[in-house]
Image: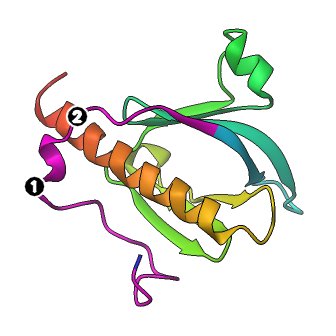
């Protein structure tokens, strides 16, 4: 992300990288903000795979085959990083913005790595839908 892009929603990748291979699965623990009032932050196990984002309460739930609390395609991803926190939405999130944060509150690098992985998965999702797969 450039300094100008920080704090702004980034549009989906528009480049020749559409030809890229399927990105590797990325999984890990993140803080996720609830949509209840008042909002709270909870640790969740999050995976990016096959052009989708999914999350569960625990990694054990995911490993045990439980249905995720939420899963949706990243086609049309818009993402914004603010320090160790990032906000994202996609066509499939129906206008809902989801907020995540690095578990270690000051880890901007971890948030940046998640943002990069989100963008790669979104590009893959775009290619998947374009190619009808």
- Mark 1–mark 2 Cα distance, whole angstroms, equals 12 Å
Q: Which mark is residue 131?
A: none
**Residue 122 shown left or right of residue 82 in the figure:** left
Q: Is residue 129 magenta?
A: no
- What residue did someone put label 2 on? 21
Q: Assign a secondary structure to mark 1.
A: helix
Task: Decide which of 67, 31 is in the foreground and name it.
Answer: 31
Q: Is residue 8 magenta?
A: yes
Count of numbered badges drawn on the protein: 2
Q: Residue at x 11, y 29 (%)?
A: 131
Q: Position of residue 113 (x, y in %)?
A: 52, 57
Q: Magenta region, mostly helix, strand or loop?
A: loop
Q: Position of residue 69 (x, y in %)?
A: 69, 29
The relative height of residue 43 versus residue 129 in the rendered view (above or below) is below
Quick one: label 1 or label 2, which is nearer the N terminus?
1
Q: Residue at x 62, y 33 (%)?
A: 70
Q: Residues within 10 Å of mark 2 (few under 14, many from 20)?
A: few
Query: Residue 21: which quarter of the image?
Result: top left
Q: Residue at x 54, y 32 (%)?
A: 71
- What residue did someone put label 1 on? 16
**Residue 87 shown left or right of residue 119 in the figure:** right
Q: Position of residue 9 (x, y in %)?
A: 43, 73
Residue situated furthest bottom in the rendering: 4
The relative height of residue 42 versus residue 55 in the rendered view (above or below) is below
The relative height of residue 16 versus residue 51 in the rendered view (above or below) is below
Q: Quadrant of the N terminus?
A: bottom left
State if disc 2 and disc 1 touch (CB < 8 Å): no
Task: Give the magenta-colored segment's residue range.
Answer: 2-27
Q: Quadrant of the C terminus?
A: top left
């Amino acid at each position: 992300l450039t300094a100008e892009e920080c704090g702004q929603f980034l549009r989906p990748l528009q480049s020749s990288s559409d030809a890229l291979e399927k990105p590797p699965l990325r999984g890990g623990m993140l803080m996720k903000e609830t949509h209840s009032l008042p909002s709270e932050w909870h640790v969740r196990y999050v995976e990016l795979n096959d052009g989708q984002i999914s999350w569960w309460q625990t990694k054990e739930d995911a490993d045990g085959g439980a249905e995720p609390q939420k899963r949706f395609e990243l086609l049309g991803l818009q993402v914004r990083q603010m320090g160790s926190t990032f906000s994202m939405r996609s066509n499939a999130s129906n206008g809902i913005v989801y907020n995540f944060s690095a578990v270690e509150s000051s880890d901007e690098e971890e948030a940046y790595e998640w943002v990069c992985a989100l963008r790669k998965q979104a590009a893959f999702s775009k290619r998947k839908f374009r190619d009808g797969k």
